[in-house]
Image (cartoon, rainbow, N blue to C red):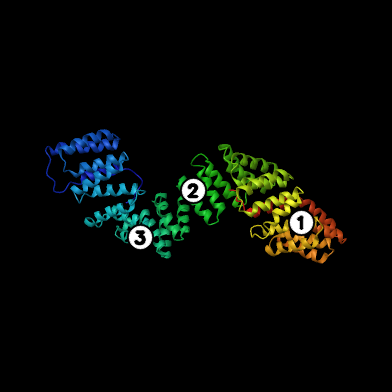
Amino acid sequence: MRHRNTRYPGVILCILLAPAAALPAPPDTSADEARLVRIQQAIQSGDLGGARSELQELVARAPGDPRIYNLLGVVDAQENNFAAAESSFRRAVQLDPRFTGAYLNLGRLYQEHANKKGGLDSALKVYQKLLEFEPDHVEANYQAASLLNRLGQFASSLQHLSRLPADAQQRAPALALRCADNAALGKRAQADAATIQLSAAADLTEADVLPILPALHDHHADDLGTRLLEAIAQRGLGSNVGLQALAGLQEKQGRFKEARETLEKDLQLEPPSVPVLIRLAKFAYQSGDLEGAVGYLAHARDLEPENAGIHFFFGMMCIELKLPPEAKQSLQEAVRLDAANPYYHYAFGAVLLQQKNADEAIAQFRKYRDARPDDPRGNFALGVAYFDADQLDAARKELESVAARPETRVGANLYLGRLAVREDNLTEAADRLGKAVASEPSSPEPYAELALVHIRRKEFGLAESDLARALKIAPDHYRANLNLLMLYQRTKDPRAEKQAHRVEELQRAGEERERLLLRSLDIRPY
């Protein structure tokens, strides 16, 4: 019953034992029978050329013997000649419409070439034809159930499973199909029961579970596939394919730590590959282990030093880890290797701004804007860079052009407010910063900047209120803490000395600016 992705020698013995029905006896029958046995042995030993030569001689002697065409089909299939194999198997069943072995071989041929148009339907029709004269045939019923499952005919699949003997219904291949069929039909209790039985089955393998994963996914039952693959992994039977499938399911469920642990097992089965290492880095990042992500990426970088994506991911991790020199080096290399990727230029520009290199940042942001002229975030980033370079007119032009766009409304108004503060235009500054607050009340930056305007106006109560909101959102926000220190100093507040120490601890020049830029683009490091 268990169908594996194998070739045909394994079914030859049963084929030869099936006599042709109502066939005229060829001359020297005993010699031909012995010759068929030798041909079978030649096929099993890999002598396909010798087997074909003898079969062609036999065709001339006994053109009505379906077993000869069946064996020719086996040879053709072994040599990956689909059309010839199909023709030979069809000739065999044409000569003997009740030749079970030939039907099985033809059905398996279609299954192994399911990517051909109509391959699954053709295989199903073959098994259904066999079942017309052998309705209880175990293999045919199982394969029909499997094909119907893949074709989305889940109720019919269950009907064929019900025709299997009781012991066959309790084996892992049948239980797997029963699980998927019931899940697809919304019969969750029956699907859960099959999953429990299948998880405990001694003969459970990945070959039973992997084919049903698409049906489970399409019908919102990924958790069943996860449970089954976890049961296999716990037994130490997971292959690299199964482990990667399990990691993918765990990732979809937000179980990044478990996904990483699963994929780590893959490294024990085969040499580390770049795709696996990058996935591990992604899982480490998603679970908050930045150092672990950097370790995987360093290994991947050693394997593929010319892979721009690895350098970019590494650089983004270095930003998170507050390693500006390493971030700059990695992002610069990503830009060198893939100068056409606008996101690499954007991230590199953000790092350059952090390192007070506004002129070079301007060049990087221009490349992003030129590549994505319809994206207002390019104008926003250029405006920030011009602001840092004290090119205030150019900054105002870029920022005003995108101040009404939803993607950049907060950041553009924030920097226009800062620009107005720098020009001592506190009325405009308050208006711009008020718009930024209204656009995103959960962002600490506008509150911190608006507090500075209130301090300049000696509206200390309003300033304290704005800073309280900013620090409630982000207690470690540098600008908010810095402006709170300024407020305490202006009002002779005794808490100023303690706040000064706090600011020293948090001082990371440019961090908020850099994060605002990257957050506005919502860059994914992987």
Q: How many marks?
A: 3
**Circle 2 — which element?**
helix
Residue 260 position, x and y percent, is: 55, 49
Residue 360 left/right relative to 193: right
- Which amino acid, by three-letter code, is at mark 3? Gln
Q: Is residue 152 above or below residue 372?
A: below
496 sits to left or right of 248? right
Residue 36: where, in percent of width, then height? 20, 38
Dot 3: few (<14), some (14–19), or many (≥20) neighbours within 10 Å?
some
Q: Which residue is mark 3?
A: 153
Q: Of label 3 and label 1, which has the lower sequence position? A: 3
Residue depicted at 73% across the width and 54% down the height: 396
**Residue sitting nearer the eye, 77 or 377:** 377
Examine the rendering and report whether any part of residue 292 can be seen.
Answer: no
3 and 1 marks in contact (CB < 8 Å)? no
* Label 2 environment density (alpha carbons within 10 Å; few <14, some 14–19, many ≥20): many
At 29% from the left and 38% from the top, the residue drawn is 44
Q: Residues within 10 Å of mark 1 (few under 14, many from 20)?
A: many
Task: Mark 3 or mark 2: name the one nearer the start of the chain.
Answer: 3
Where residue 412 sits, quadrant-wise, is bottom right
Residue 206 lies, in percent from the top left, at 42, 50
Up/down of 432 relative to 58, above or below: below
| Lower position in the chain sequence, tag 2 or tag 1 | 2
- SS at mark 1? helix
Instruction: Give the amino acid at mark 2.
Output: Gln
The image quarter in which residue 86 lies: top left
Which residue has dot 2 on it? 244
Question: Which residue bears the numbered disc 1?
Answer: 418
In three-dimensional space, the C-alpha distance between marks 2 and 1, rounded to whole angstroms, equals 49 Å
